[in-house]
Image (cartoon, rainbow, N blue to C red):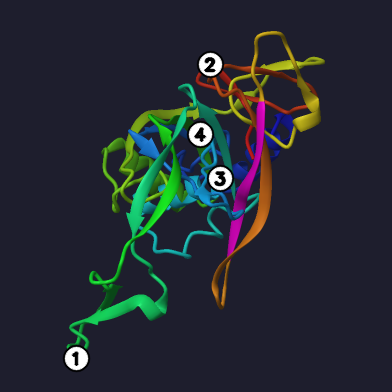
Amino acid sequence: MGQESLEQWAGDDEDNTESGDAVSPERCLSVTVRGSWGHFRRIEGNVVKQTYRIIPRTTVAGLFAAVLGIERDGYYDLFAPDESAVAIEPVSEIRTINMPMNTLSTADGNLQSLNGRGKLSMKLPDPTTLRQQHNYEVLVDPAYRIDVWLSDEERYRELRETLEAGKSHYVPSLGLSEHLAEIEYHGEFEMEPGPSGDSVEVDSAVPDAVEDVVLEPGTRCQVEESPAFMTADSGGRTTAGFTAYTYNPDAGSLTVKNVEPSRVDGRTVVFV
């Protein structure tokens, strides 16, 4: 999102300002999320359960929903296109290893009820069944700088205040629940128009710009497509859109043409 988008947000905000307390669409919240391990399961099937290298936008939405305490399937509209903006920057080298894990099936036929006759009941995997061993590809020491803007002013303020307090309603994780995450809040920053020119050096992963990356000697570049938006339906949830991220696995910058970058806290990023 470039200058035109920022000016549109600013114009929208002028109509809703209340005694200087309204959230300006020209500002965003910025955090770094990191952990010892991470696993963002790729949707295509494979014997090895592979992971996305860049935290998917849908996972970012779920992460902030956990901070806010929003229930599962209850936050998709909050992070819908035109209702939110997210920029993702890897801040450490992206490394993976394969890790064997013993798992129990969570299919309905393999669950047993606990306290089935009581007022409260829950289903758990049957601990007497044989474990299945799967190879998981996991990220080692993943860390991402994430910038986020929400059009919902009330939720934006709530997120800002919760992050400022160093709190979270639910325990944050990097994909799998056992991969606990630490969230470092950097603050609220202006979203200024980024540099212009035939090509721009971008610090974040760049969405939907595969053919516009300027390949340079010594700079590695990788591409992956991951879920970006979700919608709720009768079956639970459905992926409503994907984003193809181009990124530097060494956590460096990329030179890109035909992008609309923004400047946030002295960094050049691209929002989606």
Give me the disc on residue 147.
Answer: 4
Please name the residue that numbered disc 3 is placed on. Answer: 57
Where does residue 37 sit, x and y in percent of width and height? 36, 37
Q: CA distance from mark 2 to mark 4?
A: 13 Å
Please name the residue that numbered disc 1 is placed on. Answer: 117
Q: How dense is the environment of label 4, judged by Cα within 10 Å: few (below 14), some, or many (20 and up)?
A: many
Q: Name which residue type carries label 4.
A: Asp
Tell me what residue is drawn at x 60 percent, y 43 percent. Answer: 13
Please name the residue that numbered disc 2 is placed on. Answer: 266
- For numbered disc 1, what is the local secondary structure? loop
Considering only order in the chain, which callout, 3 or 2, is on the residue closer to the N terminus? 3
Considering only order in the chain, which callout, 4 or 1, is on the residue closer to the N terminus? 1
Q: CA distance from mark 3 to mark 4?
A: 11 Å
| In the displayed structure image, the side of residue 110 where residue 218 appears, left or right | right
Tell me what residue is drawn at x 33 percent, y 39 percent. Answer: 181
- For numbered disc 3, what is the local secondary structure? helix
Q: CA distance from mark 1 to mark 3?
A: 41 Å
Where does residue 212 sit, x and y in percent of width and height? 79, 26
Q: Name which residue type carries label 2.
A: Gly
Boundaries of the magenta span: 222-231
Using the image, determine if residue 254 lies above or below residue 160.
above
Considering only order in the chain, which callout, 4 or 2, is on the residue closer to the N terminus? 4
